[in-house]
Amino acid sequence: MSVVSGLLSNALVSGAVLALAGLGELLAERVGVLNLGVEGLMALGAMSAVAAVSGTHDPAVGVLAALATGAAAGSLFAFATVVARASQVLCGMALTMGGMGLAATLGRPFAGQPSAATFPVLPIPLLDRLPVLGDALFRQSLPVYVAFLILPLFLHWLLFRTRHGLALRAIGENPAACDAVGMKVLPLRFAYVVLGAAISAGAGAYLTLGFVPSWSDGVTAGRGWIAVALVIFAGYRPWRIVAGALLFGFVGALGYLAQARDWGIPSAFLGMLPYLVTLLFMMLPALTGRGRVAAPAALGVAYYRDQR
Amino acid sequence: MQPGELPRTVLPEAARTAFVRMRGITKSFYGARANDGVDFTLQGGEIHALLGENGAGKSTLMNVLTGLYQPDSGEIAIEGHVRRIASPADAIEAGIGMVHQHFKLVPAFTVAENIHLGWNETPFRLDPASLAARTQALSDRFGLAVSPGARVADLSAGEQQRVEILRVLARGTRILVLDEPTAVLTPAEVRALFAALRAFRADGNAVILISHKLGEVLEIADALTVMRAGRSVATGSTAGASRSSLARLIIGDTAIPATVARNETDVPGAQAVPLALRGVSVRDHRGIALLDGVDLDVRAGEILGIAGVAGNGQRALSEVLTGCVRPDAGDVLLDGDASGPRGAREFADWGVGHIPEDRLRTALAADLPLGENAVLRDYRGDAAGSGPFLFPRRLARLARRIIDDAAVNLRDSRIPARNLSGGNQQRLVAERERRIASRVLVAAYPTRGLDVGAVAALHAGMQALRASGVGVVLISEEIEELLAQADRIAVLFAGRIAGILPVAQADAERLGLLMSGQVLPEPVS
Amino acid sequence: MRGFVVQRVPSVSGRVRNAAYAVSALVAVFVAGLLLAALGLHPLALGGSVLKQSLGSRFGVQDLLLLASPLVMCGLSVSLMLRVGLWNIGADGQFYVGAACAAGVALFGPHGSPLLVQITMGLAAMAGGALWIAVPALARLLLGTSEIIATLLLNFVARLGLDWLVTGPWRDPHGMAAAQTARIPDPLPKLPRDWHLGGLHWGLAVVLGLAALLAAAFRFTRWGFELRICGANRDTAAYAGMNVRRRLFQAMLLGGAIAGLGGMLELSGTVHRLQSGLSNGYGYVGIIVAVLAASSPLGCVFTGLLMALVLNAGLVLQTQGVPSSAALALTGLILLFAAIGERLAHYRIVPTRPVAGAGGVA
């Protein structure tokens, strides 16, 4: 593998985690719920995937376990924010703390060991023979294809090309309008928050069954937060989220390369890079004078029919 | 006692064919009983006006009919069949559609997208071109002109209303509910709306019209129901009804307070101009002009009325007159001086009081206690503290006095302002601002949400300020209020002053022309 | 017929909200107890031993107070920003930067009178904390960037930076441990012996004094009144002539400074050297401290002690074979229940009265 090919491959692998987590968060935010619990969901997904494969040695079971755990935790979050209409910021923080704490507690038997199963490489016939790009792009595992192609393609179609997507976006913009035309606002919100949470937890499964691949306390390392920021500066659009994830994956991969080649930069500074770049990118839309990114108008606001 | 044995105002024959029959509807919210055993009947082929003061329960009753609220008790029959309307979807299914006072549209979406939102006839695959074509077809069929590709956020209030009506009609509505539909319309738009409603009625459909404009009601409605304090107090035909008979029904047995007449006497020193605008322009964040080259003199000892359809720059005008917003071009002159105070704090210190149009979002911190809202202006004064320090006891005493002077009928100043009735909120704001308005008071829609007695008290307060030499700016959409209170009336249209008339030369017709952007036939001195 | 309906109150008073938080925290602890019981542990016995270890002896109480101090400081930092309606999720980072600045002064600064050194350390820590939040603060006020995510991202940067310092340039040249500096020469002095709180340092007095000072500033100054209005409704504050941006900026910088000072007190009073993991997630727990206290500074002292008890429970659980991270899960649970409880406090069960006009008995 050449340097370029290796860099790109690494960028895809580490970017896939962010892309999946970001796409999950996108669903919640598009229906108007700010889920700050992505970090906790990823930790839960990562832990439960490792736990599930330790017995079965089947990564598919690991993914299912992560999705189910994410859906369960997401249901609790959705109950709190959509049904009880509690503060989304607080519940998100609670989900992060609770999820990380629970994952660390239950995951202790597996901590530090290599995962019992990982995702197999799935080469795309013919395309994987392409020089440079073939190795990097088309000799990846299934979750990478899902993160960068299948899921964004599907979500873009769903959100912008279907009647259902129009309804979802409208709920994030103006739930009162949706209510008035007879849509079921709270059930739809609930469903998509849960679905998004499952996908974010699935990102955790790829983290421990593909990218790292082992479980340890703190393995998520703030990626859930970067994913939340990613959704904001991607302007709530699936393809831009994926592009941003690739960019961050690239920054991360550059860090590994620098470390491996020993360019003399302390690893701590390389480690800071993704967070600093994220911060910079969050400010960028306003800095470049393109104005603030249009967030869904009702993002973070609980819906009451009898609002006075 | 059987419900059927209750005395009814509607004949049994009519009741069988009634489009809508609501019986004994009761709905309470915390601290308020909005509907208290309300009966309401709507016949096919009629335009039925629903009258009453703010808070009488009209909107609540209609929200029950359209499935937004579930009544605590009572039943609804549609065309003779008792139905449970558990959600807006049920109401739409039953042929009931409502156009709300605050439009329920998605501003970021196009007209076509809003029309097709949540509609089971919308094609599953979304294609902008076909949505636009479908919208155009609907627009032609119902005779309501809309532009399918336009973003709703860019439309005027009148255009948005057409979109809402079209959306409701497209779903096969036979019972159309309109909540204060004319408040945001120019006189010409009102005529067009009424023509559309008559055509709708002619097809055998029915309209429920919530309104407080009695003239309009007498012009278009066939029947009416009057609500007072959550109950239905009268129902019948509009034939033979007059403005005064309706007004008496709406207000009830309580003595009608004498309307406050304009003080015709000149005030000494009335020629002074404490506050003036010269070529003032204000733009929003997109660069669109909210005010465009406005010249205006606020004279001491006069009430300057500002007429105009809502959304023509009233908010920007009140903000620029009170220092909340600085003009992008032009000067704000205080005593003829453009170099004076600049921000809201300096304007307030100089003696400008401000009753803004949106009291819950701007004038009050709704979740904070009444007491802290009462001292929002006075907390910096010597009565509340000294230097950087504040004395909580003195502050509480001050708050108590302001609350009492405002005649807010609540003993506990720790209650959050949001939990107060709209009338109490407005009285508190009016009193607080009156206290600091030693030079000028800018009042935007100050009588919104007040009952008749409170309106009279507020008008008396403004006349008293005028008599003491304060310049009062009264922004209102009620032409009758302006004609009764103001000395001069300026008309805002599209961010410009379309004309300024002394009240002696002003009448509803001429103001209406100016409000729709037309030029008066003869020049105005 | 008499029935009941549930009605929502648009706004509730502070007293009702506080009661809701108290009940929620108790329910969360109860649920945690049920979970522990499901794991085959004895929650009552565990709770008893937590209370006994924390409150049963003078040493236990001293340890509790030592643990509570940084929690209260972070809680005060979050509270101050909550006053103006902003979230400080970055108290952890500000705490680290403050500690690092203080350590720099202590290790490499000139030696002077102990009091002067402490004051310089404190000022350096406050400046560091304020500087650390300055970028998110400016981004929030000038560009509209979410302060939640911006402050949080900088936590990771601060933690990595501190790791670099203590493993690299500032590493203790004579020590065995890989990730710590040398002991600082002049730590914060202990409280006088005859106060019978021998294990405690003057930092505790600073914490209590600061809480009282902030409480007084909120209640007895016009500045405090303006912060409250700015937090409740920024449009109203601007309408009333307040300089909203300036107040928000002041609150953010001061919040960062307080968290930074917390780091200095922890370094100089308790740990005596800069080391990796100096803040054991204190900044995050500080959010719960502030929320449960409804952002009242004096309330933070009590909720800080409460959360110190919860963290202590984690240590006790560890002796029972449950990882200490279970305490983090418990804090999450408490926060979730508090958030839900605050909303549920807005509902009242009201008996329905018979319809007046329908001929029934009034």
Image: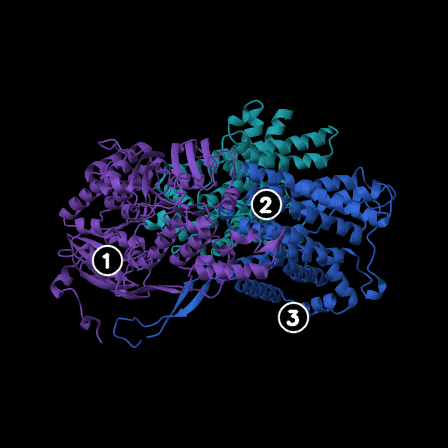
Chain colours: A cyan, B purple, C blue
**Does label 3 or label 2 sit earlier along the sequence?**
3
Label 2 – label 1 distance at C-alpha: 49 Å
For the N terminus of chain B, the image quarter is: bottom left
Q: Which residue is mark 2?
A: C247
Label 3 – label 1 distance at C-alpha: 70 Å
Q: What chain letter is assigned to the residue under label 1?
A: B
User: Is residue C12 visible in this depiction of the protein?
Assistant: no
Q: What chain letter is assigned to the residue under label 3?
A: C
Residue at x 28% of width, y 42% of height: B503
| Circle nearer the viewer, 2 or 1 | 1
Residue at x 31% of width, y 57% of height: B452
- The answer to whether A177 is drawn above or below residue B455 in the figure is above
Disc 1 element: helix
- The answer to whether C260 is drawn above or below residue B522 in the figure is below
For the C terminus of chain B, the image quarter is: top left
Q: In this view of the protein, which residue sits in the foreground, A217 or C236?
A: C236
Q: In this view of the protein, which residue sits in the foreground, A133 or B109?
A: B109
Q: Are marks 3 and 1 on the same chain?
A: no
Q: In this view of the protein, which residue sits in the foreground, A2 or B208?
A: B208
Left or right of A117: which side holds B511?
left
| Circle nearer the viewer, 3 or 2 | 2
Left or right of B118: which side holds C292?
right
Label 3 – label 2 distance at C-alpha: 47 Å
Residue type pointed to by label 2: Arg
Q: Which residue is mark 3?
A: C44
Q: Which mark is residue C306?
A: none
